[in-house]
Each structure stands twice: as C-alpha cells, then as structure tokens.
Image (cartoon, rainbow, N blue to C red):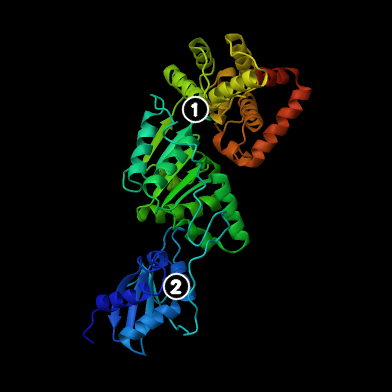
C-alpha cells in the first residue's frame, strides 16, 4: 500500500465531514490525530477515554464506512488514548501497552457493528432557549459598557474587559478574574463583556451562569449519571462566564469538574471570565491547582468608587430615567453613600419613587430622609477576615495568635468568638469558617458556637465580650 497514514486519514475526514453537521465535526473529529498505519490497521489518538467511548457509541458506523472506503473490507481502527494525570498519579490505562506508547497512551481495538446509529451532540441539561446547538447566553442586555462608568476604581478591570470583548480568547487576559466587594459592579461588567462579544461575534457561543447554578447542575448530572455529558456540554462553549466563583469553596467535586472544563477551554483558545468577592490569594477551600489557573490571566480589582465617580453614576442613572434634580442633592447622595454602587443606585431609585408616588418635589430634605432610612436599613457586609481583625484587636492579640494551635483559655475563647460571629454575620459554611480561622474542621466551629451560646448565659464577663464585639461588628 502506497498511501500514507496522513493521506488515509485526510480522505476519511473528508468523507465524514460530508455526512455530519459542521459543529459535530469540529467537536469530535478535529481534535483527533493520526498515529500509525500498518497494513489495514489505522491508529488514531483521541484526547480522553470518554472521547473514545463517545465516538464508539455515536460515530462508529460512520468511521467504519470511511475506513472501509479507504482500506477495504478488512479495515480495522485502533484508538490511542492520552494518559490523563489530572486525577493524581493513578496508573490507570497503562496495562499491556506497547513500549512506544507506555506512560502516555493505551491502544484499544474497535469491533464496530455496522448497525450502530449516528447521533448528534445533545445538550445534557435543560437551558431555556436551546435549539439544537444554539444556546441562550443568559446575558442581561441592560448591563453594558455604556452604563458601566469608568473611574480610577475600575479602570483596569473595565479596560481589560473591553480588550477581551474585542478579541475573546486571543489576549493574555485568559482567564479574566474580576474581584471586589459587594455591589461594586462585578456582575454588571461580566455581563457587559458577554453582551459586547455577542454583538461583535454573533457566531460564538457565550454562556453566563452563576457558580451556584453551575454547582447545582453538576449535582444533578451526578444523580442522573450524566457527568460526562455535563463536562462535554461546557467544553463546546466559546466564552464561559461564571459569577461568584468563590461559591466553589469547599465543594471538591465541583472544583474537580470545573478544573477539567477550564483546561479544555483554555487549551482550545476559548475565553473564561470569572467574578469573585476576593482575590485568588485570599480564597479559602479552593484547590491549589485551580487557584494557579485563576492566576494564569489577569486578576482585576473593582474598588469602592471615588467621589467623582459616584457623582457620574448618580447623574447617569438620573439621565437614563429621564429625571432632573439639583446638583446639591446629587452631591449630598454621592457623599453619603460611599462604598457600594448598588446602594447608591438604590437610594436614587427610592428618591425618584417617593417623589413620583407621593407627588413631592425632590428636595434636600427628602434626600436626607431617604438616605438616612436607606443607610440605616442596609446591613453592611462583614467578612471573616474583618471579624478576625476586630476580635484580635479587642483582645489585643495578633491574628496569627488567634489562629494558632495554643490551648490557652483566653486565646481559645477569642477564637471561638470569631467563629461564632463568622457564622452569625456571613453565609460561609462551617467548614469554610473553620478553614479560615486556624484550619479547623466544621465540628470545631459547631462546638465553638454552642460554647459561646452557653457561656453567654452563665458568665457575665463573657456576655460582655459578646455584646461589645456585636456592637463593633454592626456599627
């Protein structure tokens, strides 16, 4: 036989391409590499065991038809599966391997029945709006760059977002991790990037999803025994946007599956955009291998807006709503609400609503009433780090002392109080609280909370500790 392996496989691909949809060909056949041709046996290399199983289940008839056309009725196909070390140092798939493939691949012979049916790639879970491979992006078109005003507090993140929008997957900002406190515009910017990409590249598949929903979908896939379908659905996305990635904290299964999805997307030049309430270096209960990948691209912080930016935000909001108010009122609102854009816009909405519903003129007095009520009724977000800082300062010790292994009574009590208030003021799990406060387990945190409750009733001095710290944390 004079044909080379490359010629044979090229002709096979040409035949296959004419018989399936372009997206299916791109997903399942472009990644294949031809390895060897020996008489009537062609060896091809596939990226994973699942990839091999999918080809066998869905495309074996097509493969066999293409190969018989090239090599005759005795044609056979052998798979070579790349060794996957991502699950640790397991020696799976390495038995009885020829020396030239040992430690990297395992060949498997195909015995393909001609009655196998060819299926197209299916969506492994229900997302409203999916038609065949058309995926509803879940983006909010109201979140755009036009109404994401630039200032010193967000200039880097906004500029990076625009760069990614112009060339998704083609910049060094991959992944782009946007982090910052509550209400500073992380979700807005993530949507704006997605909306801009959809406008410039309508053929690209963009998907926005919260980390919480991603986790729930993964859990459902486990229950339905469709984990591999879940993975491969996400691997066909061109631009994946995951909001509040810190929600993966402590969820090892979700982290593991996202690790493999991330690797596939990154290696294939797809864009990943993440948001978080903290920088990678401050994330707790996230595996190091995942954190290292978060740091591959750019981590851009959104900070609290300065006074000039707050003025611009208020004016922009009023302009969009078609409302005019005096500058001194705008300045008062901007000076009064300093740390949170969401609260700032919320105050303006309340001001407009009160004026409209009660047919009142927008005066400085009305603005003061609204701001006072709004700020008073808005609970300030308290982080575990902040709680540890306040407790440590109260007991006049370093945070490292608070987190230490010592069993000295006053340090143990301080640590228990930090755990108690972390449970009270944050949404973190017991495991996450324990991990951040001295690397303890969830049982220790539970015991600490019960101890604080008991001592508050029986020990007058300890009750004062609780009251003082509660006041400091709620000011």
Q: CA distance from mark 1 to mark 2?
A: 53 Å
Q: Which mark is residue 260?
A: none
At which x and y percent is residue 266? Answer: 38, 52
Taking the spot 50% from the left edge, 37% from the top edge, the residue there is 142
Residue under label 2: 55
Total marks placed: 2
The answer to whether any part of residue 390 appears in the image is: yes
**Secondary element at tag 1:** helix
Label 1 vs 2, first from the N-terminus: 2
Residue under label 1: 320
Q: Of all residues shown, which one is farthest toward the left?
A: 2
At which x and y percent is residue 462? Answer: 71, 21
Position of 39 relative to 271 (above/below)? below
Q: Mark 1: give few (<14), some (14-19) or many (20+) Cα within 10 Å.
A: few
Which one is nearer the viewer's eye here, 181 or 257? Answer: 181
At which x and y percent is residue 329? Answer: 53, 12
Taking the spot 41% from the left edge, 43% from the top edge, the residue there is 294
**Secondary element at tag 2:** helix
Position of 260 relative to 273 (above/below)? below
Q: Quadrant of residue 95?
A: bottom left
Taking the spot 40% from the left edge, 56% from the top edge, the residue there is 264
Position of 382 relative to 172 (above/below)? above
Q: Quadrant of residue 471?
A: top right
């Amino acid at each position: 036989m004079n044909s080379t392996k490359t010629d044979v496989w090229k002709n096979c691909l040409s035949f296959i391409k004419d018989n399936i949809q372009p997206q299916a060909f791109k997903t399942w056949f472009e990644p294949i590499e031809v390895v060897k041709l020996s008489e009537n046996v062609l060896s091809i290399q596939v990226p994973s065991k699942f990839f091999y199983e999918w080809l066998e289940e869905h495309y074996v008839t097509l493969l066999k038809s293409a190969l018989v056309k090239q090599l005759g009725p005795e044609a056979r196909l052998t798979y070579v599966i790349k060794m996957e070390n991502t699950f640790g140092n397991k020696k799976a798939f390495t038995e009885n391997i020829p020396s030239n493939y040992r430690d990297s691949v395992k060949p498997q012979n195909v015995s393909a029945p001609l009655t196998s049916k060819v299926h197209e790639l299916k969506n492994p879970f229900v997302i409203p709006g999916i038609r065949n491979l058309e995926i509803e992006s879940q983006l909010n078109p109201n979140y755009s760059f036009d109404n994401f005003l630039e200032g010193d507090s967000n200039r880097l993140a906004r500029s990076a977002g625009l760069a990614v929008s112009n060339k998704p997957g083609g910049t060094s900002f991959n992944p782009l991790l946007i982090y910052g406190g509550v209400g500073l515009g992380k979700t807005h910017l993530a949507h704006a990037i997605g909306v801009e990409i959809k406008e410039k590249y309508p053929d690209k598949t963009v998907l926005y999803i919260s980390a919480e929903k991603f986790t729930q979908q993964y859990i459902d896939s486990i229950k339905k025994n469709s984990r591999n379908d879940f993975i491969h659905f996400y691997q066909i996305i061109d631009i994946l946007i995951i909001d509040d990635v810190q929600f993966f904290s402590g969820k090892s299964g979700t982290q593991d599956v996202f690790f493999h999805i991330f690797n596939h997307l990154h290696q294939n030049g797809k864009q990943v955009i993440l948001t978080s309430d903290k920088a990678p270096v401050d994330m707790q209960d996230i595996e190091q291998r995942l954190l290292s990948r978060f740091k591959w691209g750019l981590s851009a912080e959104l900070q609290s807006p300065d006074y000039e930016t707050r003025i611009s935000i208020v004016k922009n909001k009023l302009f969009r709503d078609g409302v005019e108010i005096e500058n001194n009122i705008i300045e008062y609102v901007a000076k009064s609400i300093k740390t949170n854009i969401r609260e700032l816009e919320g105050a303006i909405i309340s001001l407009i609503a009160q004026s409209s519903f009660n047919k009142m003129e927008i005066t400085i007095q009305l603005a003061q009433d609204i701001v006072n009520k709004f700020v008073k009724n808005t609970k300030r977000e308290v982080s575990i780090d902040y709680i540890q800082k306040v407790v440590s300062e109260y007991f006049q010790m370093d945070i490292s002392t608070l987190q230490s292994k010592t069993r000295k009574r006053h340090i143990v009590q301080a640590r228990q109080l930090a755990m108690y208030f972390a449970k009270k003021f944050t949404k973190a799990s017991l495991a996450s609280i324990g991990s951040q406060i001295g690397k303890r387990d969830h049982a220790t945190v539970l015991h600490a909370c019960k101890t604080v409750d008991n001592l508050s009733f029986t020990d007058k001095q300890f009750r004062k500790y609780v009251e003082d710290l509660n006041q400091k944390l709620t000011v």
